[in-house]
Amino acid sequence: MKEEYKAMLEEIALPSGVKLKNRILMAPMTNWSSGADGMVTDDELAYYRERSGGVGAVITACANVTRDGQGFKDQISAYSDEQISSLRRLAETIKGEGAKAILQIFHAGRMSPPELLEDGQPVSASAVAAARPGAKTPRELTGEEVKSIINAFGEATRRAIEAGFDGVEIHGANTYLIQQFFSPHSNRREDEWGGSLEKRMAFPLAVIDSVKQTAKKYAIDPFIVGYRLSPEEIEQPGITMEDTLTLADVLSEQGLDYLHVSTQDFWKGSLRDKSDSRSRVVLIHDRVGDKIPVIGVGSLYSPDDVKKAMAGGVPLIALGRELIVEPKWVEKVKSGHEEEIRVTLTRNDQEKLVVPNPLWQAIVNTPGWFPLKD
């Protein structure tokens, strides 16, 4: 391995005491490849197995914590004890290759496709539709339902522990329910769960507390609890960078293991102010990085890209699409063969790269998703 890449492959201890063998993680990515009952499939396991040998940890695709929290067709689920055996297969597959296994848990809220719900009715913090064509207006959750969902995050954490996962990532990003409670666009409540910025943080903080209390009760070994957030929203009103920095301040005091900043491009500037080109990841790291590890992600294809991203102090990097096109990314850096890292796909690479068919169809049929060669 080249000396200049050693830092990214150094061991790191998270605040909980869990040690990752290096600073590279597999980012959570939807793959539409579980069964209709939320159980993982053999194809899905093969996909994760192929990518779990080099990285320090794998963060799975999101798993819904309630039946009506589903966000995608054929996604991993963690809302029933019947799914523990399925989750165990996934954890054992990842850990068997040497990576820590982190289950991402979420509720889609108003982003749940109506056709996937038993009653066809999404729910959210308030009865405000997403600002996108055809979005259905959700039903506002009652106070008791809010508390039930908070408890469901704890129960999903218990299932992850019983299944053998090393941790969970609370998905507070990408427009899903936790973000919906934090956002002034989707949260117009006037009770304890909405109104001021502080009250809009109440639901995320209650979820964190539920998860942490569950881990304290059931986990024998140190257990990772991370949190993923999106820096801004383009909607008016919407989440501003100032809102997020305030949230990051509060999250940094919650005893979490990391903050995972969800961005398409690590270096991308503001969604709301085109004159502000500063990296959202770097801004959050500069604000709270002395209190909590930050994970950066987004369009970091080569070891040089990762080295540049880490140069400012960001200690952890998640690779998403990069690990689809190059499952052995870390191994090739470690062995000094970084020039062999693949950065393009052909339409004939599915079997070679061990990608489930639903995910492959999304890749090849989504323009610009990844450079494709004929």
Image (spheres, rainbow, N blue to C red):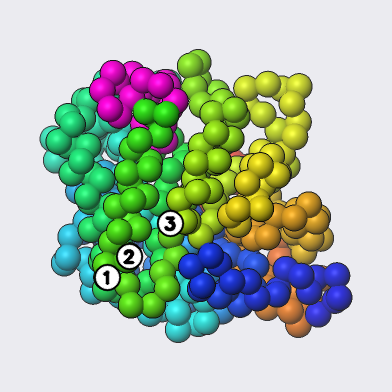
For the N terminus, the image quarter is bottom right
Mark 2 residue element? helix
Task: Identify the residue at horizontal 38%, vertical 43% (top origin).
Answer: 205
> Magenta stretch?
177-197
Which amino acid, by three-letter code, is at mark 1? Tyr
Disc nearer the start of the sequence (3/1) = 3
| Residue drawn at x 63%, y 71% as measured from the top left | 12
Task: Say left or right for 201 vs 55.
Answer: left
Occupied quadrant, residue 93: bottom left
User: What's the residue at 68%, 21% (across, down)?
Assistant: 273
The residue under label 1 is 218
- Label 2 and label 1: CA atoms lie apart by 5 Å
Q: Given contact means CB atoms under 8 Å apart, are the residues at marks 2 and 1 in contact? A: yes
- Judging by the rendered image, the residue that carries numbered circle 2 is 215
Q: Quarter of the image holding residue 274?
A: top right
C-alpha separation, residue under disc 3 versus residue under disc 2: 12 Å
Query: What x and y, as percent, mark residue 309?
Result: 75, 53
Mark 3 or 2 closer to N-term? 3
Crowd rating for badge 2 (residues with CA inside 10 Å; few <14, some 14–19, many 20+): many
245 horizontally vs 70: left or right: right
Res. 313 visible in picture: yes
- Residue identified by numbered label 3: 169
Give how far across and how far down residue 327 sits, in percent. Answer: 60, 70
Q: Amino acid at mark 3?
A: Glu
Identify the secondary structure beneath mark 3: strand
Left or right for 337, reference 74: right
Mark number for residue 321? none
- From this viewpoint, is residue 370 visible? no
Q: Position of residue 96 (x, y in %)?
A: 45, 84
Q: Amino acid at mark 2?
A: Ala
